[in-house]
Amino acid sequence: MRVLLTGANGFVGGHLYALLKSNGHEVRALTRIADARYGNDNIACDLERTENLSSIVVGCDAIIHLAGRAHVMSDGKVDASAAYESANTDVTRRLAECAANNGIRRFVFLSSIKVNGESTPNDKPFTSKDAPHPHDQYGISKLHAEQELQRVAGSTAMDCVIIRTPLVYGLGVRANFASLIKLSISGMPIPLGGVRNRRSLISVQNLCSALYRAVSVEGPINATLLVSDGEDLSTPQLIRAIARAHNVSPSLFWFPVGLLKVLSILIGKHGVYQRLCGSLMVDISETKQLLQWAPELTVDESMSIMAKSALEARS
């Protein structure tokens, strides 16, 4: 196939580019600014500013659209809602319309589980059939992007596959998960031993294998699908898995979860409490059936690969 991959130099994009190339596909690796790592495959293009997208789309068989805005600068000068809508919704709509007009057979879009919501009960995972309930501007913009893509696909011959993903981890992960890794292997006392939540997550390798199946599976397919490693872990289990991969023992101890919640509210960190103590699970049964896919790596295997790769990168 000839695949246009947007966001090729992002955390997921770099891994997916390598997977596509290793399977013999032609890839147009689209990045905001030129990136020499991709050689002649690289196309530098700011999707928000480029009016005519036909030149980057024409001749491709499929598009995997990873590019988007996950964060907005908090300097008070940026309209967060407008920034998210421009980068996530408007770009997806314009790219989808251009793709359909140029005979692209399939459009794969990386969305977020935030479209579903921020939490689930321990016994009721999210499914793709649940009514969307995004809580923030990022999740709302991703929902709007999905709706625009479905509108275009519904009136043309182009397939669309939407992949909603929970937290993604792997070599190069940043932000909250990078902080959790540091904490898990630091030896510092961690007062989360009493947490009994359940959270879905997915390694970048498993996510890339799902995206690869989404773009390559034969026959018509129009679906919104959820992905994960297939293992729902409590935060203590996740911390132990990270520590195990680094050959250390975490210093977990029991502390009243209710008191943790009160303290988090008092210091303005309730969002952190929710991520560490709340549950968020996804049901991947439909994804496994429609894509004929299953996670290739267990959590322990993925953690070991991440830890080994990080050690090799530092040496």
Image (tube, rainbow, N blue to C red):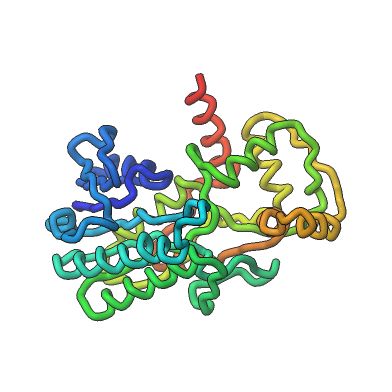
**Residue 60, image quadrant:** bottom left
Relative to 188, say whether 212 is above or below: below
Q: x, y percentage for residue 138? A: 48, 63
Q: x, y percentage for residue 297? A: 51, 46
Q: x, y percentage for residue 165? A: 49, 59
* View extreme (front): residue: 77
* 9 with respect to 105 (left or right): right
* Residue found at x 45% / y 66%: 81
Q: Nearer the viewer, residue 282 or 70?
A: 70
* Residue found at x 68% / y 33%: 185
* View extreme (top): residue: 315
Q: Nearer the viewer, residue 48 or 78?
A: 78
Relative to 53, say whether 247 is above or below: above
* 190 with respect to 303 (left or right): right
Q: x, y percentage for residue 301? A: 55, 40
* Residue found at x 18% / y 37%: 40
**Residue 148, image quadrant:** bottom left
Q: Nearer the viewer, residue 206 or 63?
A: 63
* 39 with respect to 13 (left or right): left
* 44 with respect to 124 (left or right): left
Relative to 51, say whether 192 is above or below: above
**Residue 289, image quadrant:** bottom left
* Residue found at x 53% / y 46%: 169
Count of numbered tags? 0
